[in-house]
Amino acid sequence: MGDSELESRMGHELDEIERRLRAAASHAERIVDETSRHLLAAGGKRIRPVLVLLTSQFGDGVNEQVRQAAVATELTHLATLYHDDVMDSAPLRRGAPSAHEVWGNSVAILTGDLLFARASQLVSELGPRAVRVQADAFERLVMGQLHETLGPSEDEDPIEHYLQVLADKTGSLIAAAACYGTMLSGADPSIQDALVRYGEKVGVAFQLADDVIDLTSDSDTTGKTPGTDLREGVATMPVLLLRARAGAGTLDAAGQQLLADLDSDLGADDTLADVLQRLREHDVLEEARQMARQWSGEATAELAALPESAEREALEVFAGLLVDRMA
């Protein structure tokens, strides 16, 4: 973070958040306890709790409500992962078998529902405004998944459609984290507005970076199986950029062959590996990288309204780190 005192305080608070997450995800029934703590035990970046804690520094700092919001936000995120893995038929999550691979789709979906319920219980104790923030974010999470499933309409630009999906599925909850941190610490409304905008743009940047990383890294690095989206026919940004070039008549021969192969059967591992390698070598991947960096830069620009401080610098570093993972 660049400030040792701030880093120490945040580290201490994150340790406490982790303890509370384990308690919130636990259950008296053994099988329910095992399933609900499955992804939690696999670890994670804890981006949302970090942002709740950091943004509270622009008000009166971390308090009991801020801690509770940090836990609720991460529980909500974990719940979406259980559902996403079922929707995407993902075999791995954070280096471990996805819950649906271990217990089946029904148990994975119900476990996600249980975590949503636990998060809602925590938020209900934070007041009506916090409940509305949670409800609005939850609606956007569902709409993002629905729009991803249905795809763009005939008169809709696929890239703009996808960016909106990312804003809803990822940006909305990260923006909610920033909202909780500022709102529950008594920060000035203008600061809250700027940090909510920052959070949403950071979320889009993060997911665009993930699109690149999912294609360029191995499963040991990402904890997920590379090319899962390609195999399932889910178009992420590099593929959408290929299709946009094809539509504009500017796609090179290598890209045209890639698109043809992407639209074929990718069930065989060697076929998928070949397509992945050629996509990694195509310059469309660098275009996707630049988009992630652009969104990160736009997020950082929202911080101009904030007073200069170690906390603001930490948020600038935070935005940069999310896209530096692509290197």
Image (tube, rainbow, N blue to C red):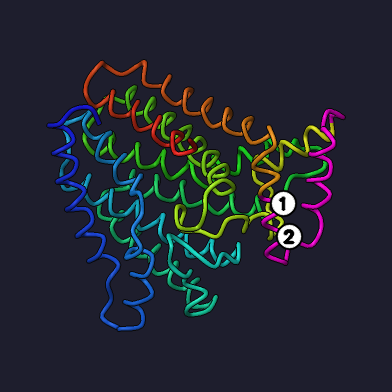
Residue bearing the label numbered 2: 271
Identify the residue shown where x is 45% and y is 26%. 299
Considering depth in this image, is 79 or 217 the residue closer to the camera?
Answer: 217
- Magenta stretch mostly in which secondary structure? helix
Q: Report which quarter residue 112 is drawn in.
A: bottom left
Element on which disc 2 rests: helix
Element on which disc 1 rests: helix
- How far across and how far down the image is residue 137, in percent? 46, 47
Q: Which numbered tag is attached to residue 275?
A: 1
Q: Which residues are magenta?
A: 248-276
Neighbourhood count class around disc 2 (C-alpha, 10 Å): few under 14, some 14–19, many 20 upward: some
Give above or below for 23 relative to 215: below
Give above or below for 215 relative to 264: above
Examine the structure image and report whether residue 40 is included in the region drawn in magenta. Answer: no
Quadrant assignment for the N terminus: top left
Considering depth in this image, is 225 or 208 the residue closer to the camera?
Answer: 225
Looking at the image, residue 324 sits to the left or right of residue 233; the answer is left
Examine the structure image and report whether residue 257 is included in the region drawn in magenta. Answer: yes
Q: Amino acid at mark 2?
A: Thr
Mark 1–mark 2 contact, CB under 8 Å? yes
